[in-house]
Amino acid sequence: MARVEAVVVCLLVLAMDAAAGVLGIHAEKAQSQGRHLRILFIECRQPVRRAYELGIAAAAVLAASHAIANAAGGCACSCSGDKLRRASPNRQMASFALVLTWMVLVVGVALLVLGALPNRKNKLADCGVARHRFLSIGGVLCFAHALFCVVYYASASAAAREERRAATHG
């Protein structure tokens, strides 16, 4: 039963992260449809409401996916370096993957939101420093997040199984 749950959680996280990645890439495409003028590093763009909606939706789905993976995986952290060195390889991998998922989440959500926000207004043009590819890079990071979440969840599940076995046999 635990293996079926693990497969379901992994597939759910993969599907949500893939959806977030596709939304981010589509937001970039929608943004590129608007009119823009670039002079050196300053760029004036016509806001595209659809890019805003898709970018914010991608950030929300990415955050929800992260919450599900972390809730299902439990706490795999080892607070001290000495405790981490003595932990099982599965626990070490889960801790490492957990840190990576958080880093990718923070950067991915930041890029998606920063890429989407200039599109929230309905004015003629928004001028500022060029923010090229924030939405598409954020979308690609959603796919990386999926990989690290699956590694985290699988490692945390394996470590929990090992600890349960050791508790019943020890």
Image: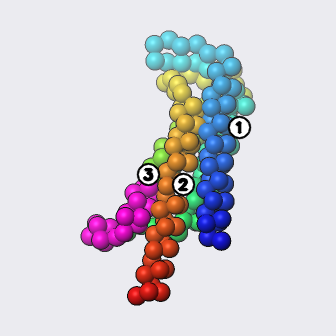
Q: Earlier in the sequence, mark 1 or mark 2?
A: 1
Under tag 1, what secondary structure?
helix
Tell me the distance, in whole angstroms, between the alpha carbons under discs 1 and 2: 27 Å
Residue at 62%, 16% in the rendered image: 36
Magenta span: 81-99
Which label was assigned to residue 53?
Answer: 1
Please tell me whether mark 3 or mark 1 is closer to you in this view: 3
**18 over 12 or under it: above or below:** above
Mark 3: few/some/many CA within 10 Å (<14, 14-19, 20+): some
Please tell me whether mark 1 or mark 2 is closer to you in this view: 2
Tell me residue 1's x, y (percent). 65, 71
* Residue that numbered label 2 is attached to: 150
Residue at 61%, 66% in the rendered image: 3
Q: Are marks 3 and 2 in contact (CB under 8 Å)?
A: no
Q: Nearer the viewer, residue 20 or 44?
A: 20
Under tag 3, what secondary structure?
helix
